[in-house]
Amino acid sequence: MPSYYEVLEVSPDATPEEIKKSFRKLALKYHPDRNGNSDESKQKFMRLVEAYEVLSNEQSRKKYDGRTHTPESSTWIPSADFSKVYSYEELKRQYRSSVQGGMWDISDKASMGMWKATMILFAGLAALVLYILLLR
């Protein structure tokens, strides 16, 4: 498997501007929309995005450059992978201990309270509609 530098066709001492320029050129060339949405272009494009996300961030680039393992042994999660990064369960796990009450409380107890408040609101609106209809 090629290194991220090989994927982006830059040298390991490339500047951030060179990395960005190469990524833009290759992203346009291999974008799935420009290549009939072929599986090969999708895989190539995702590999470009992966390489760019790692090499464009100074901290992740340093970590990548100093790694002692091969790229295959690390798993990369795309930033748009909502099922792993932005799932409700992951958010609950992450914020359960740090948030107690308020609008950012996503605990089960707070969710049940919001559900009850919503039901009371709808019941009130339904009663208001019935009252208006009966007055006619």
Image: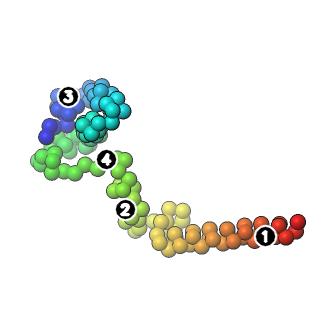
Amino acid at the residue labelled 2: Glu
The picture quadrant where one finds residue 45 is top left
Q: How is the image coloured?
A: rainbow
**Helix, strand or loop status at disc 2:** helix
Q: Is residue 53 above or below residue 74?
A: above
Residue drawn where x is 16% and y is 45% of the image: 71
Q: Is residue 109 above or below residue 37?
A: below
Task: Tell which residue pokes out farthest to the right in this image.
Answer: 136
Residue drawn where x is 37% and y is 62% of the image: 90
Residue drawn where x is 47% and y is 72% of the image: 108
- In the image, is 92 to the left or to the right of 70? right
- In the image, is 59 to the left or to the right of 106? left
Q: Earlier in the sequence, mark 2 or mark 1?
A: 2
Q: Earlier in the sequence, mark 2 or mark 3?
A: 3
Amino acid at the residue labelled 3: Glu
Quickly name the residue at label 1: 130
Quickly name the residue at label 3: 9
Quickly name the residue at label 2: 90
Quickly name the residue at label 4: 78
**Is residue 72 something that shows in the picture?**
yes
Q: Disc 1 vs disc 3: Cβ atoms closer than 8 Å?
A: no
Which residue is nearer to you in this view: 45 or 11?
45
Q: CA distance from mark 4 to mark 2?
A: 15 Å
**Helix, strand or loop status at disc 4:** loop
In this rendering, the label closer to the viewer, 1 or 3: 1
